[in-house]
Amino acid sequence: MSRPISISRVMALVLIALLALSTTGCERAKTRLDREVDRLCAIDGGVHIYETITLSKENFGPDGELFPQYRGDVVSGGGFGPDYKWNSFTKRIVDGDPSLTRWEQTIIKESNSKVLGKRIVYVRGGGDLSGPWAPSAYSCRDVPLDLTQQVFLKEDSK
């Protein structure tokens, strides 16, 4: 003998089915942009070092901070003093939710405008169900956070 299905059980199943269908598009958009992040990262993402600069120990603070003498000099391009400039650019490639952004950081030698190094990261943000939690993000993998440590090297003290 079969048991009758209650109205509340049917309503719960319908609600679950609707919720699953409504999130399917979000997950497809996120997955598509995550694949695009991987593709773009493979093309030009990561850290690109064109020239390294060896600096004396006076240009490093006790905690390894670079150019502590220019710490408060943000106007010069990130506190690198008169010789080097720090630029940061963001470009929105896909607007909306989810979004796709290209973030580029560059260190430039002021005397000849030569680019010493770049850090390029692509980031997918959002595309989740709305709620009280922070949106998810996906970006290039294995990209060092600090470009300065790869461009500016500390002189060996022998």
Image (cartoon, rainbow, N blue to C red):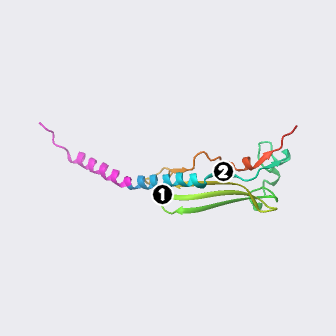
Residue 144's tag is: none
**Amino acid carrying mark 2 in the image:** Val
**What residue is rendered at 45% in x and 52% in y?**
31
Quadrant of the snapshot with the C terminus: top right
The percent position of residue 118, horizontal first and vertical second, equals 68, 55
In this view, the residue in front, 118 or 43, is 43
Are the residues at dot 1 and dot 2 in contact (C-beta closer than 8 Å)? Answer: no
**What residue is rendered at 51% in x and 63% in y?**
95
The residue stretch that appears in magenta:
1-24
Choose mark 1 or mark 2, whichever is in front. Answer: 2
Residue 127 visible to an observer of this rendering? no
Query: How busy is the neighbourhood of tag 2: few (under 14 within 10 Å), some, or many (20 plus)?
Result: many
Query: How busy is the neighbourhood of tag 1: few (under 14 within 10 Å), some, or many (20 plus)?
Result: many
In this view, the residue in front, 150 or 59, is 150
Quadrant of the snapshot with the N terminus: top left
State the SS at label 2: strand
Majority secondary structure in the magenta region: helix
In this view, the residue in front, 134 or 38, is 38
The residue where tag 1 is placed is 98
The residue where tag 2 is placed is 47
The percent position of residue 43, horizontal first and vertical second, equals 58, 54
Q: Is residue 22 magenta?
A: yes
Horizontal relation, residue 76 to residue 10: left or right: right
Q: Is residue 33 magenta?
A: no
Horizontal relation, residue 155 to residue 46: left or right: right
The percent position of residue 101, horizontal first and vertical second, equals 56, 59
Residue most extreme to the right: 158
The mark nearer the N terminus, 1 or 2, is 2
